[in-house]
Image (cartoon, grey):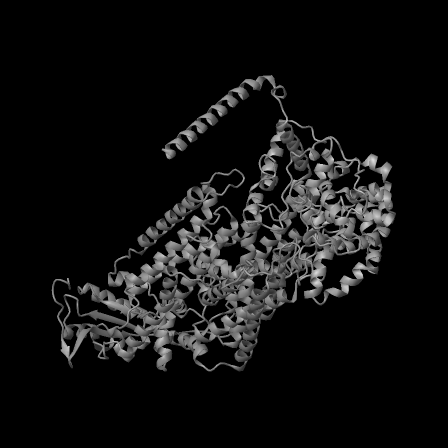
Amino acid sequence: MSLAVPNGLDNSVERPGTRAPLVLGESSYHSITEAVCKIAENPPSKLWVISFLVAVHLATMLGLCIAYLFYTGVGVWGNRNPVFWGWPIVNFVFWVGIGHAGTLISAILYLFRQEWRTSINRTAEAMTIFAVVCAGTFPGIHVGRAWLAFWLAPYPSLNLWMWPQFRSPLLWDVFAVSTYATVSLLFWYMGMVPDLATFRDRSKHPVRRAVYGVLSLGWSGSSRHWMRYEKAYALLAAFAAPLVLSVHTIVSFDFAVSQVPGWHTTIFPPYFVAGAIFSGFAMVITLMVPARSIFNIEKLITIRHLENMCKIILTTGMIVGLAYGTEFFIAWYGQVTEEKFAFINRAMGPYWWAYWTMITCNVISPNIFWWKKARTTPWIMFVVSIFVNIGMWFERFVITVTSLSRDYLPSAWAYFEPTWVDWAMLIGSFGLFFTLFLLFCRLMPIINMAETKATLAKELHMAHKDAH
Amino acid sequence: MSETKPAPKTVADGNTVHGVVAEFSDVDSLLAACERVRDAGYTKADAFTPFPVHGIDKALGIKPTVLPWIALTAGAIGTCTALTMQIWMNGIDYQYIISGKPYISLPAFIPVSFELTILFASFGTFFGMWALNGLPRFSNPMFTSPRFDRATDDTFFLFLDAKDKRFDEAGAKVLLGDLGGEFVEPVVEDDSPKKIPSFLLIGLALVIAFSMIPALLVARMRVTKSSSPRFHVFPDMDFSPAKDAQQISTLFADGRAMRPDVPGTVNRGELDWDVDFQTGIDMEKLAQIDAPRARQLVAMMQSDTEIGEGDGEVAGEESPAEEAVEEVTEEPQTEEPAAEEPMADEPATEEPAADEPAAEEPAADEPEAEMQEEPESVKEESASEEPTAEETATEEPASEEPAAEAPAEEMAAEEAPAEETPAETAPEEAATPAEAEPPTEKPAAPASLAPASGPTVDTTPWLTENPLTVDAEVLARGQQQFNIYCSVCHGMNGRGNGLVNQRAQQILATTWTPPSSLHDQTLYQDAYPDGKLFSTISNGVRKMPGYAAQIRAKDRWAIVSYVRALQASQNATLDDVPASQRKALQAKQAEVQAELEKAAAKAAADAQQSAT
């Protein structure tokens, strides 16, 4: 049983009265299995090995930096009075933001029955997990004495004899990020179990079979199991969707609940969430465009998938631009001296370069997606996605550092300068992210085979009906 | 049902048959077959598919799952847990006072409650789903057939369970064949050994046993006593190179553990321009008698840090540095020259920078000039100071002058800062060392030990009146401070027999100098003016250290007033007591007298009794 969609068909073109196919080429259930499993079964390509080695080295650098930090103390960072939230927090917010697209694609698009999500959701979810790992590292080491980070947890302590302060956004953050990491992990893993069973059933080597056998929990594909599984998946999606929104809302509370000019604004929650989706989708594009050509899965991750993501980037980019404008408007409209100053200082102060980098990357560059040509040309979207990544990092930098470096008291103003450790940790966190991602590409099903097959079944069914 | 009636089993090749399975290659034929099987009355049929097939629940008659209820329950437990936890922890057990907000502030508890609701509901869903599905499952007869591997790839399987009431193997095979199923075959029991291999069990047991060791060690340590210090996994700041003030530190280049004041700053609570109040000396009069000294005192008060700096280097650093010479080898470099030439240079070079902010004040220029000559003389003083200090302690006159001075000191010391006199008798250099001295409110400067190299006539124009307005409040404060700081030696009544003195007598301490009785005539107001008493409290005398660092100037004055009150109390008559309180006092006196008599009578009786 197979479906033949002409390989060269441009599925990004809307044809009235028909649904655009989401799986291209001569495809059957088995060909999908083959295409996905081969990625993990074939020996690694040279390109993979080289990128993996680079990534592992960068991740090791991060580890060494952390060891150096623990040994010496937080003075190795550029965090100085008055900017005590330097790059570690910038990196934390950046990575948490990246981590939002995965669950958004999986959960919210699932609830809206957007079937184009099926071939990208696995990668996006994996990206979420790895980004949250990177994100969680930073506040963990930022507490100074990281070996006492467990003090964040509400446990009956015989040393402290006290409980945490539940009215602090920083504690909400602990709960939000750890819940998000846990639920994302459950969601990702649960989604992978049927595909891990496929891996298990295809493996020849007994060790490989045993490992995938344990990971797939004895999945057999029983209809009763599928029924409960789908229900559970829908429930988790329903829980994860508001969770995504709540997490970045709470991250924004870390800033908005304080009194610092430029932070103390009610627009922060929606603004942060839009920015998170924006950066997350950009990162998905950054990962998918090279991955689909390296692993030969262009038929599964089609131009239409990419185009849809470009549209979301365009939309959220405009929301983010609107938020930047609104901040300025409110600063002027509110007529609070410090607030007005904070925003003029952002654009014209000593960090003007960061601000205008952010505007260029986040507000101006996505506008190229108004042209369909740009939305359907992978290299253009790759370039734009890199710009957006840079721009979103700078957005967090601008918010965190410019506000702190010049708040109420001019005598306390100072210019923030990062140290080499700051740089090494930022670069190292990308190393950690790509190490995990490359391992994932080799060891796990990077496309949700079961769901893609279900999509194919639907298309076969319709092709069948059309034939009659 | 299968539970009530034993399932019909067929034995083939010694293996139990669990049912019959057939393959289908596409969704539509599978769905059709499922419906036929359901219509044929099978309730335990199951399909195995590589992806969730739409409509198969209906086709097989699968009942909806209770999973949403599990999720709801788990979510509700999450909400309750979160609210209970927060209300208990922050509302009841450990209340944080934050801007007067209520301890139980529900709006602030929403985020955590929301997150825990989601977390618990997700756990409920995730684990509930696997539990309902009976997974993970270690062995499944379906997997015995190698063909079944394709169930997760592209093939659909329909399975008729042997536990079904209607099941019989031959009939099921026929039915599935009729429905278009291929490779119809029985599902037989997995004949691989069921027992877990013993090496795995032993390995597991060993792992468990070894993992208990740390826990047992911890448990043992908790109940046993140990004389060795605590084991610090993370030392944190437990072993930081912390130093007490005036110890030698290797951390700073100047070897001082205590950091000098930052130039151009005033310590909190030390901004005080009233020199009279701080020294107990009438400055105007002093200016007439001894202008340079008065000028220096004023300069000292006004630009505390500069002189403080110089002062610190001379008096403060000298002593630790002297000791440091022996231990710290890097020190001598700074030490020797510091005492000789650079000493004179340093203030001169440092001055412009430090002085700039104060340049508006006209007075600031004069001290500058003063300063430049001062260090030389101060250095001399400090040079002679060390030996004398030792000397006084050991009572062994050994240096040039003190020979004559030592005896004089004994008595002159009582009138402690009497060193004033050189101002008249001695030339400038001799005068200045003494000058450097009353301002040494800093305990670092052992200036009170400086020899009074001259006659012991005290011409210092001490303040004769307490600058505080003495009232009951000041007296009460003075009493409190006296009882805290003075009474340990001088006694609560000021007779010089405090606890420390009693103990010293008891252990026959040889180096102990008994504290003066404050009721000595020489310490009365006419012989010993208030200002002098204040200066003695501030700078110390003989073995008594200065208390300027511990007691604020205002409180020292309060103590002065209280000492005067103590002295007055010993020479008072009933007429000195306010009329309104005389009665009460008399009553009290009668009461005390009666008690004393009673005690005396009792003692007499006891004596008599023991005699008989």
Q: Can you give x and y, in whole percent of width and height, for residue B469 in the image? A: 69, 28
Farthest-out residue, front: B612
State the residue at coordinates (86%, 52%): B372
State the residue at coordinates (58%, 58%): A89
Q: Can you give x and y, in whole percent of width and height, for residue B220 in the image? A: 36, 63
**Residue A41 seen by the camera:** yes
- Vertical order, B24 against A354 (above or below): below
Q: Can you give x and y, in whole percent of width and height, for residue B72 in the image? A: 34, 51
Camera-side residue: A104 or B419? B419
| Left or right, A424 with reference to A5 | right
| Left or right, A49 with reference to B303 | left
State the residue at coordinates (60%, 33%): B479
Residue A354 lies in quadrant = bottom right
* Image quarter of the N terminus of chain B: bottom left
Q: Can you give x and y, in whole percent of width and height, for residue B170 in the image? A: 14, 75
Camera-side residue: B565 or A376? B565
- Vertical order, A183 against B478 (above or below): below
Camera-side residue: B270 or B343? B343
* Image quarter of the C terminus of chain B: top left
Residue A418 lies in quadrant = bottom right
| Left or right, B164 with reference to B119 | left
**Residue B153 seen by the camera:** no
Number of labels in the image equals 0
Camera-side residue: B116 or B358? B358
